[in-house]
Image (cartoon, rainbow, N blue to C red):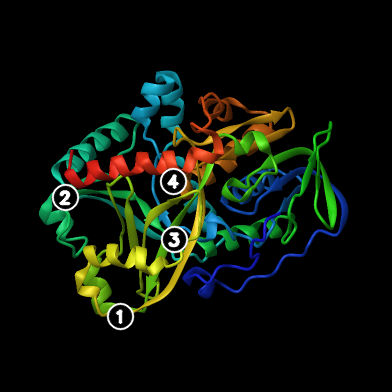
Amino acid sequence: MSNLDLNYPASYYAASANVHPEYPRLEGDIDCDVCIIGAGYTGLSAALHLLERGVDVVVLEQARVGWGASGRNGGQIVNSYSRDIDVIERTAGNRIAEQLGAMAFEGGRIIRELVERYSIQCDLKDGGVFAALNGKQMTELEHQKALWERYGYDKLELLDANGIGGVVASKRYVGGMLDHGGGHIHPLNLALGEAEAVRKLGGQIFERSEAIAISREEQPIVVTKGGSVRAKTLVIAGNAYLGGLVPELKAKSMPCGTQVIATEPLGDDLAKALIPQDYCIEDCNYLLDYYRLSADKRLLYGGGVVYGARDPQDIERLVRPKMLKTFPQLEAVKIEYRWTGNFLMTLSRLPQVGMLDDNILYSQGCSGHGVTYTHLAGRLLSERILGDSKRFDAFAALKHYPFPGGHLLQAPFSAIGAWYYSMRDRLGV
């Protein structure tokens, strides 16, 4: 493994996490029905769906539950995928688009089901807003509304200039769209609550138990420094923190970093003035900004991408100007937390799902749109393991290609592409 710090980063989420156990390291050799590598949302969702059907599950985590993107993200429940259903129609055809479109709004429902079923305390709030900075983006939101409604989704409401002004106190936006089925959560507490549900259902979680080798046998064996797990089926759900464990998965994906800051508590009056209905908000730029209020009335603001997942030296310097461009009234407000985390991007910006062998499954590459998709992925993985492969196979049918120039050039090429789209955003073309 790399020299990763296996403790939680110094984020607002870690500082406000619910009381939770530390799970043991794996010591010795054990057997199970399904071994899952990764205790993030994908792995935990898969574990819960399997355990609910009586399957014996072991989850291996190299660091702590929710340590990766699942516990560091913006906490926004955003429907569909990083590339929307119309892109899937053009690139994969109507049959696959119809199948994926039918699942595009399921992840958020799964989150709410798990929160209710297992009484997970994660500050769940309803409502998410897409904010348009120009007329072109507003037209695109109108198209998005029609697209989602064509796939049976009826929870969208267009906002004109007055409407967007009533949900966010910023002069940047010309309009927007409210998704009543969106929302936001404390992401680390969601992961910790899901892990506790796994434990109560009889699943085993081992932290600080990095998978260092996989023996691809009739029953795969995952080796850690302290022991091994032999399973009938293996699920690989490491995403951006899988490293080089599985070379064929690394070849078609790239870790990218994103940054978040959290202000000091704003107080009820200022918080309500900024975002009166407590919705989460993201703008419509290619490199978008996203923000929301925490339960204790801080503003959590994220934005920007670091291609290749290098940790920036000064997160506040990168993100605070974005926050002040949106809310200049926060000039005197202090930033109390700042952190970074990696997500896994694919060239198509669509998730990669498939099988390495008959008994090794994987899902990865949410491309910055993972909170909802990962929960859907866990259900799809469980369905495939339990004998129903139809929905899993729809995702597996998506074609994926390596980044041009291999790993050496994937970051600069992607950054050039992002610069191009960012310039288009600025020019409104």
Q: Nearer the viewer, residue 295 or 317?
A: 317
Mark 1 vs mark 3, CA separation in Å: 19 Å
Identified at 35% across, 43% down, the residue is 418
Identified at 42% across, 68% down, the residue is 314
Looking at the image, residue 170 lies above or below residue 220: below
Query: According to the image, label 3 marks what residue?
Result: 185
Query: According to the image, label 1 marks what residue?
Result: 267
Amino acid under disc 3:
Ile
Earlier in the chain: of badge 4 and badge 2, it is 2
Mark 1 vs mark 2, CA separation in Å: 27 Å
Does residue 300 appear in this view? no
x, y percentage for residue 4?
64, 61
Q: Which of pointers 1 and 4 indicates the residue nearer the eye? A: 4
Query: According to the image, label 2 marks what residue?
Result: 175
Element class at badge 3: loop
Amino acid under disc 4:
His
x, y percentage for residue 223?
81, 48
Q: Nearer the viewer, residue 368 or 94?
A: 368
Q: Residues within 10 Å of mark 2 (few under 14, many from 20)?
A: many
Mark 3 vs mark 2, CA separation in Å: 24 Å
Earlier in the chain: of badge 1 and badge 3, it is 3
Q: Which of pointers 3 and 4 indicates the residue nearer the eye? A: 4
220 to the left or right of 8: right
Query: According to the image, label 4 marks what residue?
Result: 369
Element class at badge 1: loop
Q: Quadrant of residue 125?
A: bottom left
Q: Residues within 10 Å of mark 1 (few under 14, many from 20)?
A: few
Earlier in the chain: of badge 1 and badge 2, it is 2
Amino acid under disc 2:
Gly
Q: Which of pointers 3 and 2 indicates the residue nearer the eye? A: 2
